């Protein structure tokens, strides 16, 4: 069976192909005015990667527009000259989504960071794409409102990036992902047209193009304004940290909580290595040496939360929890979350480099998957820390390595890929919230058949027939995904008998 | 299904630089303490530091963010870039506020990194002639109290003889380059009677002596903020400290160090260590955030000096900000109420660089009736940053105005901060008259039973040109 249809091959072969000429440069410079164009080689190199540093490509130019009109003008220049462009928010993406394209430009939205308007009565706000996730909640806190999606990177990642990645966070279990909290988008299509997708009302007439753009990872166009939905702060919030003797019991506790009909606002799990890193970074009070800790948060109406909170504690104890720590006040709760949210970045405390993986597995497979990951990590001789959204089975294994040791980065990359593919094998998915980007494009074929991929490529071509908008991301490029001439080489983990090809 | 290949999209194999891997080679840097690879590799490129970086807040450019600057250092180490004006400009634009150190979950020691890079630039990059002259002028003047006194007298004459208002009225001020305008505008109104004030070499404790402490009188502080020094000595003695202030002490070298003038900074550090050699104290108190953070770094600064390394480390271990010491001591002197709402501004070199945030607030809260308010966006620098507002006046002004907006938003009766630089900076952009104090001044007033906030208020407001008014006693 083939992996790709001929139609697919033809569609993804379109990748602009234009050059950044002097004429193009002049047009772009005129579109953004002085100070909005970066072209010095050393400066361009600071844009060569996003949060995934293993992949680097230096862009030909970086432009920093400040209005929708400027963005549209730059995109029109790209379309005329068939020059590929890549949108960039804060560059915290973990899948190489904002990785520049050689001979292409980066359109940075970091200067578009105004909050346009807040409509308290209707609980919505209009913000520019460079506003950070946390700034939205901060701006409306005085009205007792907040923006629900809460990726761990919320202090820095932009709403534009959240829309592109359809980001989620610890509280997605109950509140859903970014797509559930975005009403409308102002959108610059790859030919430079400005359109509005969605509207102020929650339900729209006709096909929901807003939803198509959410999670499209910057491959369909550039978002220049976002109307977000705001929620009222819950009346009561209770948070606890329960320690478990092994990840299996913690996993069972999660299943029992959900089976009891309780929908926690968040359920997060950290393993021993992750706890060590968090504690080194922020001293959030997690128990060092504990094999698995669960953070459980309940919110809602006071009486109901109190009752369910009791039951959660009983369930944890019934699953052999060795210690339960209850946050007494908002300060304590903030400390627990600060620890959890610093987890990825805190890996720097215990390892020079790391790959963050992002896979989804059915909740019931938690224990067995973690055991497999442990075996694979031992075989590869690399440490793997685990932090994840246990409630919805979204795993974040962190493969630790030292880039200065020859070959280690590659081994880590292979292990990381093998872990995601293990998730698919367990009946899960290759990404929960960090996106496909450059990193996992080749793994798409593990999850989708040729027809699926062809339909995706058609959708993309409908928006971007020239293939200039973030090309090479999400959809696999056959030539670069193993269709290389030369003999077949088994994967090291395959050779070790730990993974097998489907 | 066919087999997925684990190799990723695009020929993007993680690059490992051969030189860096071998742990040698300094690229564009010389061999004298280039930024260390271990420190650079602590950065995992997560971006958590971006929102607290003042230059990123202003320009939204990667190369003027902590993450970008560390990336530039890495490339410098690899020799992948040139050490040219473009490269140097991004380090010159860094305020050294260390907000990124506080924000970083990965424990990146940006303070050590930037302090390694600045001397490299001073040695290996030739600045433009006006730039060199201007920086030279600052360092001829500032670190010398005696020269500063002369400058202060001239500055005061300039003000009092009406030259200042003439220059402003006629628009002649605009003929000055931006940097000189900044010097002109920031020049504090020296109170002539202070220019003659000296801190006595030894001041005995009031009542029982609980501690014997050394006191750093500072260079700018001594000349322009003699009141703060007097208040500090009064508070410390009232709390049972015998205060030793060796007359031979000079500038601590903080400004030189932060500007990368390493030999000068080292020399000043050695001299200061010598000045305190016979003081027989186990605590050395500073009331200036920038100086204190530098004193705490002496150990690292002089690590290569066989004669001083050990003494420097011992010296640094004794250094405390005055609020740290006061918070440590159980209060003995009775406090009288000051009914006021005081906004506390965290000076970067106290909050970010020394991690001293709760102590000054505790000191202020020990005053009955005084309400301490935090300022929104407190982690972002006011733009003062040592000599930054003199050499980079434009971004400094934007940051100053931004800070003033935030202070205004909490409508305080007064502002307290532990760094003279911040104070001059905020005062420069303050639209009216706001009494401003060092926390220790408020404590001193409370112990003495006077209410400086009310007194300042009764002087009447607003004086529209805030620079010519005398806000508070600071
Ligand atoms: C420490 C750490 C923790 C993280 N935790 C989480 C987490 O809990 N949950 C989660 O979901 N993610 C998480 N992430 C990943 C990342 O923060 C999110 O994917 C985030 O949404 C990216 O936002 P950004 O502004 O940094 O976007 P970038 O990284 O700059 O870009 C991401 C993608 O969005 C596109 N894009 C950006 N702006 C626009 C725009 N205006 N219009 C169109 N396309 C655009 C880019 O082309 C790229 O494909 C984490 C990252 C880090 C480093
Ligand atoms: S927060 Fe720390 S690790 Fe993250 S990019 Fe900034 S300096 Fe690097
Ligand atoms: S020290 Fe301040 S200005 Fe410099 S990089 Fe860090 S946060 Fe930015």
Image (cartoon, coloured by chain):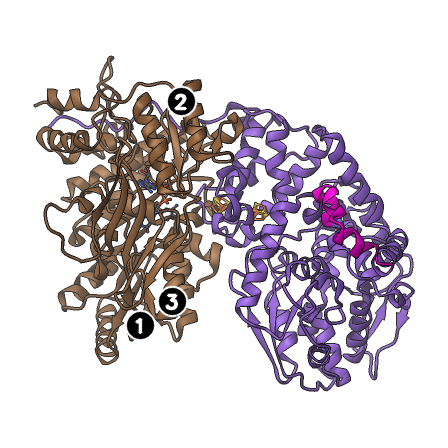
Q: Chain of mark 1?
A: A
Q: CA–CA distance between discs 3 and 1?
A: 16 Å
What number is the disc on residue A141?
3
Residue B458 image-quadrant placement: bottom right
Specify the segment rendered in magenta.
B161-182
Which one is in front, B79 or B392?
B392
Q: Which residue is mark 2?
A: A24
In the rendered image of this protein, which colour is used for chain A?
A: brown
Rendered location of residue B390, percent (x, y): 71, 47
Q: Is residue B366 left or right of residue A177?
A: right
Q: Is residue B356 left or right of residue A454?
A: right
Instruction: Look at 44% across and 62% down and name the residue there.
Output: A284
Q: Do the residues marked 2 and 3 share a common chain?
A: yes
Q: Which residue is mark 1?
A: A237
Q: Is mark 2 within 8 Å of ligand 1?
A: no
Looking at the image, residue B257 lies above or below residue A270: above
Q: Do the residues marked 2 and 1 share a common chain?
A: yes
């Amino acid at each position: 069976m083939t992996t790709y249809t001929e139609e697919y091959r033809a569609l993804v072969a379109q990748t602009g192909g234009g050059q950044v000429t002097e004429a193009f440069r002049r047009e772009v410079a005129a579109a953004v005015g002085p100070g909005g164009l970066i072209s010095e080689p050393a400066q361009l190199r600071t844009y060569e990667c996003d949060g995934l540093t293993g992949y680097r490509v230096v862009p030909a130019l970086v432009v920093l527009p400040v209005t929708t009109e400027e963005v549209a003008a730059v995109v029109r220049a790209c379309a005329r000259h068939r020059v590929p462009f890549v949108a960039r928010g804060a560059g915290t993406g973990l899948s190489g989504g904002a990785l520049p394209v050689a001979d292409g430009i980066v359109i940075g939205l970091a200067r578009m960071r105004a909050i346009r308007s807040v409509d308290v009565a209707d609980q919505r706000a209009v913000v520019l794409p460079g506003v950070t996730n946390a700034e939205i909640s901060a701006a409306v806190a005085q009205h007792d409102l907040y923006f629900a999606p809460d990726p761990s990177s919320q202090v820095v990642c932009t709403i534009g990036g959240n829309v592109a990645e359809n980001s989620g966070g610890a509280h997605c279990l109950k509140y859903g992902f970014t797509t559930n909290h975005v009403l409308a988008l102002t959108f610059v299509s790859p030919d430079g047209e400005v359109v509005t997708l969605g509207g102020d009302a929650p339900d729209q007439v006709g096909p929901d193009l807003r939803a198509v753009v959410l999670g499209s990872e910057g491959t369909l166009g550039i978002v220049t304004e976002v109307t977000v939905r705001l929620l009222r702060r819950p009346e009561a919030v209770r948070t606890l940290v329960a320690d478990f003797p092994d990840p299996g019991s913690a996993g069972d506790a999660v299943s029992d909580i959900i089976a009891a009909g309780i929908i926690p606002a968040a359920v997060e799990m950290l393993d021993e290595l992750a706890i060590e890193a968090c504690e080194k970074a922020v001293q959030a009070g997690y128990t060092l040496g504990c094999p698995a800790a669960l953070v459980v948060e309940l919110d809602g109406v006071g009486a109901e939360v109190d009752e369910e909170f009791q039951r959660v504690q009983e369930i944890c104890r019934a699953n052999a929890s060795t210690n339960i720590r209850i946050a007494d006040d908002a300060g304590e709760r903030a400390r627990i979350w600060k620890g959890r949210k610093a987890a990825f970045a805190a890996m720097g405390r215990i390892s020079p480099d790391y790959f963050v993986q992002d896979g989804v597995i059915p909740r019931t497979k938690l224990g067995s998957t973690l055991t497999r990951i442990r075996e694979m990590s031992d075989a590869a001789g690399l440490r793997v820390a685990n932090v994840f959204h246990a409630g919805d089975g979204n795993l974040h294994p962190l493969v630790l390595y030292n880039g200065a040791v020859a070959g280690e980065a590659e081994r880590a990359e292979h292990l990381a890929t093998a872990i995601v593919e293990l998730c698919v094998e367990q009946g899960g998915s290759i990404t929960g919230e960090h996106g496909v980007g450059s990193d996992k494009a080749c793994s798409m074929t593990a999850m989708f058949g040729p027809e699926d991929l062809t339909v995706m490529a058609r959708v993309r071509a409908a928006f971007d027939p020239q293939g200039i908008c973030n090309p090479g991301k999400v959809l696999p490029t056959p030539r670069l995904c193993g269709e290389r001439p030369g003999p077949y080489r088994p994967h090291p983990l395959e050779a070790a008998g730990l993974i097998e090809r489907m | 299904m066919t087999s997925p290949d684990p190799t990723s999209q695009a020929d993007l194999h993680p690059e490992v630089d051969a030189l860096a891997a071998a742990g040698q080679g300094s690229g564009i840097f010389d061999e004298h303490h280039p930024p260390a690879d271990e420190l650079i590799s602590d950065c995992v490129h997560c971006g958590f530091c971006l929102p607290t970086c003042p230059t990123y807040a202003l320009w939204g450019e990667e190369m003027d963010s902590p993450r970008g600057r560390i990336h530039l250092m890495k490339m410098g180490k690899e020799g992948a870039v040139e050490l040219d004006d473009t490269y140097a400009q991004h380090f010159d634009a860094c305020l050294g506020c260390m907000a990124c150190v506080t924000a970083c979950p990965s424990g990146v020691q940006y303070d050590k990194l930037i302090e390694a890079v600045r001397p490299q630039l001073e040695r290996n990059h030739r600045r433009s002639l006006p730039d060199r002259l201007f920086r030279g002028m600052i360092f001829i003047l500032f670190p010398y109290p005696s020269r500063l006194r002369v400058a202060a007298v001239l500055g005061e004459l300039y003000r009092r003889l009406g030259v200042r208002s003439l220059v402003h009225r006629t628009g002649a001020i605009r003929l000055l380059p931006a940097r000189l305008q900044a010097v002109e505008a920031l020049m504090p109104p020296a109170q002539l009677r202070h220019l003659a004030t000296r801190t006595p070499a030894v001041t005995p404790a009031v009542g029982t002596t609980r501690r014997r402490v050394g006191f750093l009188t500072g260079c700018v502080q001594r000349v322009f903020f003699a009141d703060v020094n007097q208040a500090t000595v009064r508070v410390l003695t009232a709390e049972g400290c015998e205060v030793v202030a060796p007359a031979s002490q000079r500038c601590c070298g903080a400004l030189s160090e932060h500007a990368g003038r390493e030999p000068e900074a080292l020399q000043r550090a050695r001299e200061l260590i010598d000045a305190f050699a016979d003081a027989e104290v186990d605590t050395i108190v500073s009331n200036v955030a920038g100086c204190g953070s530098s004193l705490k770094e002496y150990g690292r600064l002089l690590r290569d000096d066989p004669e001083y390394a050990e003494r420097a480390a011992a010296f640094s271990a004794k250094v405390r900000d005055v609020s740290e010491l006061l918070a440590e001591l159980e209060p003995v002197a009775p406090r009288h109420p000051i009914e006021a709402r005081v906004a506390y501004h965290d000076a970067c070199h106290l909050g970010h660089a020394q991690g001293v945030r709760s102590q000054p607030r505790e000191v202020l809260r020990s005053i009955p009736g005084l309400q301490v308010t935090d300022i929104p966006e407190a982690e972002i620098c006011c733009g003062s940053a040592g000599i930054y507002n003199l050499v980079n006046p434009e971004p400094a002004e934007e940051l100053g105005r931004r800070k003033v907006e935030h202070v205004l938003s909490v409508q305080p009766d007064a502002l307290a901060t532990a760094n003279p630089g911040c104070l001059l900076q905020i005062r420069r952009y303050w639209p009216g008259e706001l009494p401003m104090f060092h926390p220790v001044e408020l404590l001193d007033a409370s112990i003495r039973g006077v209410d400086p906030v009310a007194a300042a208020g009764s002087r009447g407001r607003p004086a529209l040109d805030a620079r010519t008014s005398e806000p508070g006693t600071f």
